[in-house]
Amino acid sequence: MTKRTEQYDVVIVGGGPAGLTAAIYCGRARLKTLLIEKSLIGGLATYTDEIENFPGFPDGATGHELMDLFYKQAKNFNVKFKFTDVKSVEVVGDKKIVETFRTNYEAKVVIVASGGKPRLTGAKNENKFLYDKGISFCATCDAAANTDKTVMVVGSGDAAIEEGMFLTKFAKEVIVSVMHDPGIMDCNEIAKVEALNNPKMSFIWNTIVDSFEGDEHLSTVVLKNTKTNELIPVEVDTGFLFIGYIPNTDIFKGMLDMTGAGYLITNEKMETNIPGIFAAGDVRDSFLKQVATAVGDGAIAGYGAEKYIAESEIYENQILNEGEPSLVYLWNAVDPSSRELLPVIEAFEIKHGKTVRVTKVDSYKSKGIAERLNIKAFPTVVFINEGKVVQTLSDEISEEKLEELIKL
Ligand SMILES: Cc1cc2nc3c(=O)[nH]c(=O)nc-3n(C[C@H](O)[C@H](O)[C@H](O)COP(=O)(O)OP(=O)(O)OC[C@H]3O[C@@H](n4cnc5c(N)ncnc54)[C@H](O)[C@@H]3O)c2cc1C
């Protein structure tokens, strides 16, 4: 089957809070934007009935309500949506090819907002009680609903123990299932000591989950002692699983830099190791994974996309100047020697501007253009002809030297 090809400025992979926010920013910047979502618009946020910590909603909102508002706002800015699975992303020159079952989407920028999924125990009946049926993955989200109740935490890593201690502020009892021998936990030593001394926390050692039981809602977690095979039924109101999180990054393996656990590594501008590919939200290696942080990431990635495309256009049209001579002055506004040279460049432009296109690039505002030209020190002059760099000049830039340069 020959695939169709469609062109976009920006393709966003994933329609959770990060992807939708990036879409709002890109759409509002009048970029031709496509968001591809493989299942439900709203991502993990739609798995919860109550989001109480997203600013602007003092009475809380359901995940669906909140995400529906994000979705409507993105549609108001003419963002297009496709409901399909992204199979791969490939870089061909400056273009990114986003492959789906029927269509290949060509984009100038790709924003990866594919989130992740909580790791499951694999115990019996687990799927029956996921999310609002008694198995939770988010203490921040579900602690208040467990006020004065009995909860179980499965896991003993930093997240499990820290979230477990947070739960003790609400629940009357937090029972922790630990797979190790008594006193051995995967968390840091300080958290361990605090947890062991917390009167609301108790531990069942050498256990894994054998099954989850209940009618409509979880009522019992059956633990299994890994040494004796004894089955230990524990009555609980909610079971919190903190045994890891799996980022949706399989399709980016070998292409985008990621941590050992598979989270994408970005800088604070949400840029990945590949120019023009950004990552935002839970898919990223980050300190906190919430709707508010996903929104912040999405905003930065959307803004970054706009800047990247604008810089690409300047680079193609102005810097490369359709093969005609082009002189680029890369300067830094806070550097005195850069400022001193400005009048020299401007005088040169008045004299030779008809034959050589002169462009001044503030390296702080347009870092991407300096990167494309591989210039790291400022001030620097780059002379380009027939679309290729002929020479760069960083030392003792003067009117005479500039005139010699354009004779080359
Ligand atoms: C039960 C639960 C309750 C929570 N409660 C709260 C709360 O109260 N407050 C709060 O702030 N946070 C809460 N969170 C956390 C919050 O939901 C996440 O931090 C947030 O959704 C992350 O947004 P995201 O856009 O980065 O990723 P996600 O929400 O994970 O969205 C990623 C999207 O990408 C899609 N996708 C993945 N791969 C592909 C592909 N190859 N092609 C196309 N689409 C793809 C997925 O289907 C998904 O829709 C909760 C999480 C859970 C699980």
Image (cartoon, grey):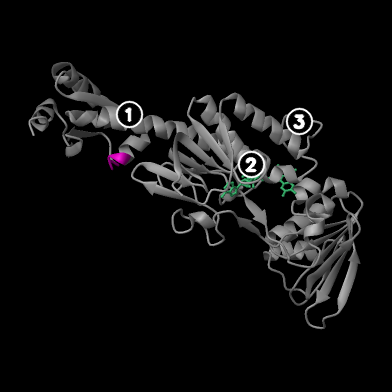
Residue 140, given in percent of the width and then of the height, sits at 76, 47
The residue where tag 3 is placed is 57
Asked whether the viewer can see residue 358, the reply is: yes
Marks 2 and 1: CB-CB under 8 Å?
Answer: no
**In the image, residue 375 lies in the stretch drawn in magenta:** yes
Query: What's the distance in space between the residues labelled 2 and 1, CA to CA?
Result: 32 Å
Crowding around mark 3 (Cα neighbors within 10 Å: few <14, some 14 to 19, many 20+) is: few
Asked whether the viewer can see residue 393, the reply is: no
The residue where tag 2 is placed is 16
Q: Quadrant of residue 239?
A: bottom right
Q: Amino acid at mark 2?
A: Gly
The residue where tag 1 is placed is 314
What residue sits 41% from the left and 43% below the top?
A: 96
Circle 2: element type: loop
- Pick whichever of labels 3 and 1 is earlier in the sequence: 3
In this picture, which residue range is highlighted in magenta? 372-376
Crowding around mark 1 (Cα neighbors within 10 Å: few <14, some 14 to 19, many 20+) is: some
Q: Quadrant of residue 5?
A: top left
What residue sits 44% from the left and 59% below the top?
A: 254
Q: Amino acid at mark 3?
A: Phe
